[in-house]
Image: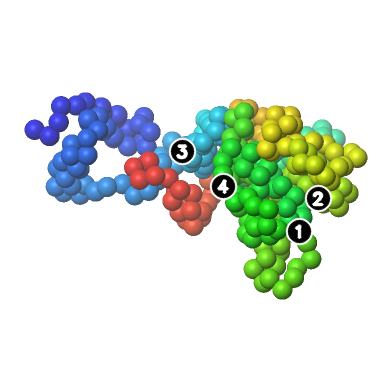
Amino acid sequence: MLDDGLVLFFAGPHSVTGEDLAEFHCHGGRAVITAVEKALAEIDGCRSAQAGEFTRRAFANGRIDLSEAEGLADLLSAETELQRRSAMEMASGSLSRKVDDWRERLLLLSAQVEAVLDFDDEDDVGGLSQRFSDSLSSLAQDVTDALSAPHAETLREGYRVALAGPPNAGKSTLFNALTETEAAITAKIAGTTRDVLTQSVALAGIPFTFVDMAGLREAGEDEIEAIGIERAGAEIARADLVLWLGTEGEGPPGSWEVEAQCDRAGHVRKCEYKHRVSAVTGQGLAELRTALIDQARGAMPKPGSAALNMRQRARLEEALVALQQSTDTPDPLLIAENLRVARLAFDALTGQTSTEDVLDALFGRFCIGK
């Protein structure tokens, strides 16, 4: 006797993997689980699943496609409500259905081109019509619209906000206030922050990554500080938004002018600040947080919409280039070839054609047993 529990049997091909599947519902004590695993291991041919093996079998058996598997992987790692809803949309096949529709429209266009190529000498088959051109342009526009949507990386990593300015401008104090941590060391000594410090938080269900960095000034003899300043420049270039705490007008293009340390006598005033804050007294912090949430919400996928990752965007870009080249040539033979390339890109997007290294990288993200 190992435990008193429940066993559920799922007959293939209607199980999640498409194979016969049994689930043991045991009590959660470690001793119980260890005893059950030991008993199962004594069965000839029985072994533990590898990371992502169940989902990979579901993909191999046609129960899900590659984009749905990617959505499931994102769902397992979701930490905010926005991430969860986007991952659920992808895992439920939202993108797959859209790509299936594009593929069907593409096949109809290809059939028209093939008819022209095969029967161009017949009286009942003319050249490519204006309706063909309109349909091709409509398909290309739909793909363009999909590519213009916010990226999955922004959703996964969070809206990246960098706090920049000279030493002792109040960056680290504001960083701690926005993240509600004491992650950054604060002191009156200039150059206290030497390296890049990041903190991920969720504000109103939206993921953020706040970045504190070395103060920007002319590098002196301190080699470590010089490296920190160089890294700070890289973070400014990478950020989705920069909060500029330095001299007015000297921040990077698109940055927000923030008049910080407004509680201190003699602080540097700004004529056209976007926000005036004190991380010590809390003045202006609520308004700054609200503005950041509104800004990030506009850059994030809409709640419940699927966000494309880098691999998916690359395949769609391949398809778009092929579709655009089809519209730029009158030669039916070249059009047919470009439409074939676009179809292959759609197939690769959903995993109808894929390489082992892509699959290994994807399913390696899953936990053991999933």
The first of marks 4 and 2 along the sequence is 4
Is residue 332 visible from the viewing direction of this image? no
Amino acid beneath label 3: Leu
> Disc 1 marks which residue?
216
The first of marks 4 and 1 along the sequence is 4
In percent of the image, x 36 and y 29: which residue is there?
A: 14
Q: CA distance from mark 3 to mark 1?
A: 39 Å
- Viewer-proximal residue among 35 and 139: 35
The answer to whether 113 is drawn above or below residue 10 in the figure is below
The first of marks 1 and 2 along the sequence is 1
> Disc 3 marks which residue?
76
Amino acid beneath label 1: Leu
Amino acid beneath label 2: Gly
Viewport quadrant of the C terminus: top left
Q: Position of residue 17 (x, y in %)?
A: 37, 37
- Helix, strand or loop at mark 3: helix
319 with respect to 12 (left or right): right
Q: CA distance from mark 4 to mark 3?
A: 27 Å
How many numbered discs sit on the rendered protein?
Answer: 4
Q: Which mark is residue 246?
A: 2
Mark in the foreground, 2 or 3? 2
The first of marks 2 and 3 along the sequence is 3
Q: CA distance from mark 2 to mark 3?
A: 41 Å
> Disc 4 marks which residue?
183
Q: CA distance from mark 1 to mark 2?
A: 9 Å
Label 1 packing within 10 angstroms: few (<14), some (14-19), many (20+): many
Q: Position of residue 178 (x, y in %)?
A: 64, 38
